[in-house]
Image (cartoon, rainbow, N blue to C red):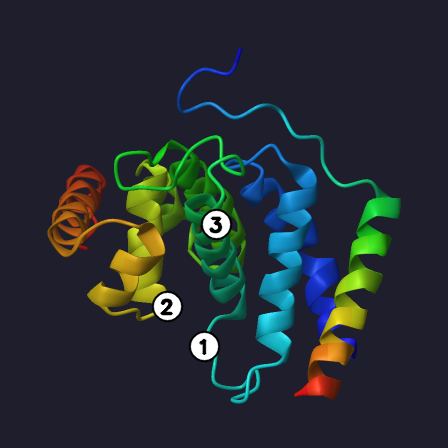
């Protein structure tokens, strides 16, 4: 049970997750710039 | 895109750790981090107009999570309010640790600077080293104007006490 004012433990991003998120954001920035 | 790559590599771990203080939904947190970077890199004004990109990233993420909380109450385990500053205080410690590495404090000054609480050290950093205005500090620390003034006063008083003990003028 999560008490008030206390979040559940979140494990850090794995290297794979970081690379995936980086690629995703990079693409989103490119698309946003293109459609602007 | 090289700027993005460098900035991302430098801050992603810190941003994710910071965001996870407020939510345990890692996918939603990734979305929020994405929004922050996209907004930053599609600004009309570019990056040049931002004095401190690191502060911008953390404050934007906090605001983004808060916005998401208002839209979808399931995202946040804790709403980010003045009354719920525990997680923000933890961020202050992260922030201070990074800032402190950047400071060229002498050993003697550093000795009594370290006796201050994380919040006191942060406000001294923001005001004296980053030359922030009180309004800016209110926003960064998430407290009101009077609280900033009180905290600043207590921090300076404490520094003077320590300096007095060490017979050094502050």
The front one of A13 and B115 is A13
- Please give the name of the residue rendered at 37% of the width and 47% of the height, measured from the top-left corner: B108
* Relative image position of residue A10 (x, y in whole percent): 65, 30
Residue bearing mark 1: B51
Q: CA distance from mark 3 to mark 1?
A: 16 Å
**Helix, strand, or loop for circle 2?**
loop
Q: Is residue B120 above or below residue A35?
A: above
Chain-order first, disc 3 or disc 2: 3
User: Would residue B149 be found to the left or right of residue B24 on screen?
Assistant: left
- Label 3 marks a residue whose chain is B
**Helix, strand, or loop for circle 1?**
loop
Q: Is residue B24 above or below residue A23?
A: above
- Please give the name of the residue rendered at 38% of the width and 41% of the height, measured from the top-left corner: B80
- Disc 1 crowd rating (10 Å Cα; few below 14, some 14-19, many 20+) is few
Chain-order first, disc 2 or disc 1: 1
Question: The C terminus of chain B lies in which quarter of the figure?
Answer: bottom left
* Relative image position of residue B155 (x, y in whole percent): 20, 45
The front one of B146 and B68 is B68
- Label 2 marks a residue whose chain is B
Residue bearing mark 3: B95
- Label 1 marks a residue whose chain is B
Residues behind callouts 2 and 1 on a single chain: yes
- Please give the name of the residue rendered at 55% of the width and 43% of the height, measured from the top-left corner: B18
Chain-order first, disc 3 or disc 1: 1
As drawn, the label of residue B152 is none
């Amino acid at each position: 049970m999560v008490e008030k004012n206390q979040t559940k433990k979140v494990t850090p991003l794995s290297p794979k997750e970081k690379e995936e998120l980086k690629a995703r954001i990079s693409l989103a920035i490119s698309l946003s710039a293109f459609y602007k | 895109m090289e700027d993005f790559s460098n900035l991302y590599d430098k801050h992603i771990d810190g941003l994710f750790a910071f965001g996870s203080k407020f939510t345990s939904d890692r996918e939603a947190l990734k979305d929020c981090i994405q929004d922050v970077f996209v907004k930053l890199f599609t600004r009309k004004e570019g990056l040049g107009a931002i004095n401190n990109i690191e502060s911008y990233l953390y404050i934007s993420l906090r605001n983004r999570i808060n916005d998401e909380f208002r839209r979808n109450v399931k995202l946040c385990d804790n709403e980010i309010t003045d009354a719920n500053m525990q997680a923000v205080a933890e961020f202050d410690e992260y922030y201070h640790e990074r800032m402190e590495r950047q400071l060229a404090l002498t050993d003697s000054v550093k000795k009594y600077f370290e006796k201050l609480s994380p919040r006191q050290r942060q406000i001294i950093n923001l005001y004296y080293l980053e030359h922030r205005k009180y309004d800016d500090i209110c926003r960064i620390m998430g407290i009101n104007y009077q609280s900033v003034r009180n905290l600043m006063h207590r921090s300076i008083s404490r520094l003077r006490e320590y300096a007095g003990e060490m017979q050094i003028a502050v």
